[in-house]
């Protein structure tokens, strides 16, 4: 266990130094969610006036939850990019050869992704508060929102890692971005689920991301909704992606 | 530009097109991703047609042209990634042994992304029409839509090339994707400017050239032949193309001089 932690610590430290000393890698992961926040809260605020739109809070709070979870997910995707870049440069292969406990590499990348996302999460939250976001949830409920986002980040990181460990190339970037993007957008992004009509309503009803977003909106509005379901979905997705990433690691080991 | 230079550009362009078309991972997302977003947004934001003074009968008509803009954005990523990869692998260094100059290399390199943008535009239009969208400007308008979309792709391709030439890193180009997205979101992409409630956002959208690109393309679908929207779109696209191409040429020249 100490060997795994030692590898994880080294990989995380190296990934964070790499990320925080390369603005070209760090800035986009911060800008992306801020852009969505501005675009939705500013450009689409009129949607909050549509008949039937009921939410305890303003439209900024409504879209903040989506953007917060999206930033967590894309934090994971950017970590996946980093792993792929390490393979392209040959660094990851050397790490695979040198690490006594290779699963520690996954843990290290996940920890680094989490740390990177924390910076983004703080900035997105501050930006939303500056934009006038109304928060009705108490401390525990807001903790629940952060918990849901953490599960989202871990899931996305493990997914990105799984893809990177299999493809070992940055050209697989879209394979990491698009499923996450689509998964997030096949949920009630702009309006509550009840205002969605047709196929999107059906898909969103079965999409586990809907539970995460609904729970998050419940937490921030002070009226928790589907919280247990959200944590169950989050934990299940994280476990599934953990298996996917570990199998990817084994495949990468065989390719050495 | 003599015949020999044109022939060399042709060789680079041929390589760029073949290399791009051989990578389904580049083409498929370029086509599928905007269509998926169109499907999602057209359904998810369909309630916006209930907002008074909304200019279209369905959000599908209103949002169809966003796919062309996103296709252009992917052209930027493709162009930048291809150029950066050539820098990373040393291909650009080898090109320096030839008489080719930076602008000629750029023209050739953009051929791949332009080909993908063209194919994608045809698919977007076909899928949009099949899904029930209606081009108000008719068949000629549809052709104009494709033409303007290509010009937009060229403009964004130039921007992608600047990033690719400056960073020389495919990873950095992929990461820059969200930065270009900033301009999309701060535009009238999702709602017409007169329906944007937040004052500062409406001001930014009015100053954002992307708004004029979107509105020009969109006018062909929801209004018909709107001269004002079209000339604004044309001037904006040409200006971005010229500036980005000159910028990319200068950046590439600097990089080639360094190596």
Image (cartoon, coloured by chain):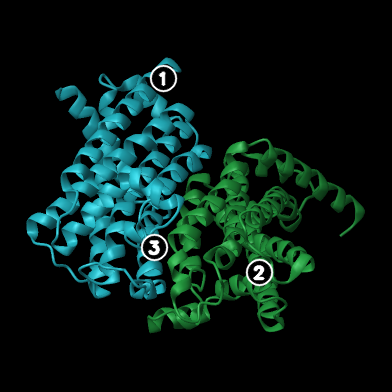
Chain colours: A cyan, B green
Q: Chain of mark 1?
A: A
Q: Visible in this render: residue A91?
A: no
Q: Which residue is mark 1?
A: A251
Q: Chain of mark 2?
A: B
- Give the total number of marks visible in the rendering: 3
Q: Position of residue B50 (x, y in %)?
A: 45, 73
Of circles 2 and 1, which is in front? 2
From the viewer's perspective, is B95 left or right of A256? right
Q: Position of residue B9 (x, y in %)?
A: 80, 50
> Which of the pair A158/B147 is nearer the observer?
B147
Q: Position of residue A142 (x, y in %)?
A: 14, 57
Q: In the image, what residue occupies the spot 8% across and 55% down?
A: A140
Residue B102: quadrant of the picture = bottom right
**Residues at marks 2 and 3, CA–CA distance in whole angstroms:** 26 Å
Q: In the image, what residue occupies the spot 73% across and 71% down?
A: B137
Q: Which residue is mark 3?
A: A36
- Which of the two labelled residues, at mark 3 and mark 1, occupies the earlier sequence position? 3
């Amino acid at each position: 266990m100490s060997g795994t932690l030692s590898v994880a610590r080294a990989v995380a430290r190296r990934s964070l130094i790499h990320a925080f000393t390369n603005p070209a890698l760090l800035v986009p992961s911060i800008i992306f969610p801020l852009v969505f926040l501005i675009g939705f809260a500013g450009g689409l605020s009129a949607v909050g006036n549509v008949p039937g739109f009921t939410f305890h809070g303003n439209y900024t709070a409504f879209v903040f939850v989506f953007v917060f979870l999206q930033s967590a997910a894309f934090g994971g995707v950017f970590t996946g990019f980093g792993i792929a870049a390490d393979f392209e440069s040959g660094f990851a292969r050397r790490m695979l050869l040198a690490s006594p406990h290779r699963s520690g590499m996954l843990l290290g990348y996940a920890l680094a992704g989490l740390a990177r996302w924390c910076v983004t999460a703080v900035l997105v939250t501050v930006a939303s508060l500056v934009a006038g976001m109304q928060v009705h949830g108490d401390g525990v409920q807001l903790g629940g929102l952060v918990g849901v986002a953490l599960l989202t980040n871990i899931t996305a990181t493990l997914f990105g890692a799984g893809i990177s460990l299999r493809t070992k190339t940055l050209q697989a970037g879209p394979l990491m971005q698009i499923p996450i993007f689509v998964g997030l957008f096949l949920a009630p992004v702009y309006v509550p689920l009840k205002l969605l009509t047709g196929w999107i309503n059906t898909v969103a009803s079965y999409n586990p991301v809907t539970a995460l977003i609904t729970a998050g909106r419940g937490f921030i509005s002070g009226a928790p909704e589907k919280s247990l379901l959200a944590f169950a979905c989050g934990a299940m997705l994280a476990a599934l992606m953990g298996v996917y990433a570990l199998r990817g690691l084994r495949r990468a080991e065989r390719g050495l | 530009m003599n015949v020999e230079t044109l022939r060399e550009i042709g060789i680079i362009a041929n390589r760029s097109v073949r290399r791009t078309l051989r990578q389904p991972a580049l083409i498929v997302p370029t086509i599928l991703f905007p269509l998926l977003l169109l499907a999602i947004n057209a359904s998810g934001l369909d309630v916006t047609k209930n907002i008074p003074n909304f200019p279209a009968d369905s959000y599908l008509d209103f949002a169809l042209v966003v796919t062309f803009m996103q296709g252009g954005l992917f052209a930027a990523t493709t162009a930048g990634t291809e150029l950066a990869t050539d820098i990373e692998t040393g291909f650009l260094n080898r090109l320096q042994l030839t008489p080719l100059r930076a602008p000629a290399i750029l023209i050739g390199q953009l051929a791949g992304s332009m080909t993908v943008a063209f194919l994608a535009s045809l698919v977007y239009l076909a899928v949009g029409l099949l899904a029930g969208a209606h081009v108000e400007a008719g068949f000629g308008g549809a052709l104009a839509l494709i033409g303007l979309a290509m010009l937009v792709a060229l403009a964004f391709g130039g921007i992608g090339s600047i990033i690719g030439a400056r960073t020389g890193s495919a990873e950095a180009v992929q990461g820059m994707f969200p930065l270009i997205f900033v301009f999309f979101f701060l535009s009238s992409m999702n709602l017409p400017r007169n329906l944007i409630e937040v004052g500062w956002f409406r001001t930014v959208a009015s100053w954002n050239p992307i708004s004029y690109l979107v509105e020009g393309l969109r006018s062909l679908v929801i209004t018909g032949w709107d001269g004002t929207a079209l000339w604004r779109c044309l001037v904006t696209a040409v200006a971005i193309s010229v500036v980005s191409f000159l910028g990319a040429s200068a950046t590439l020249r600097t990089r080639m001089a360094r190596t």
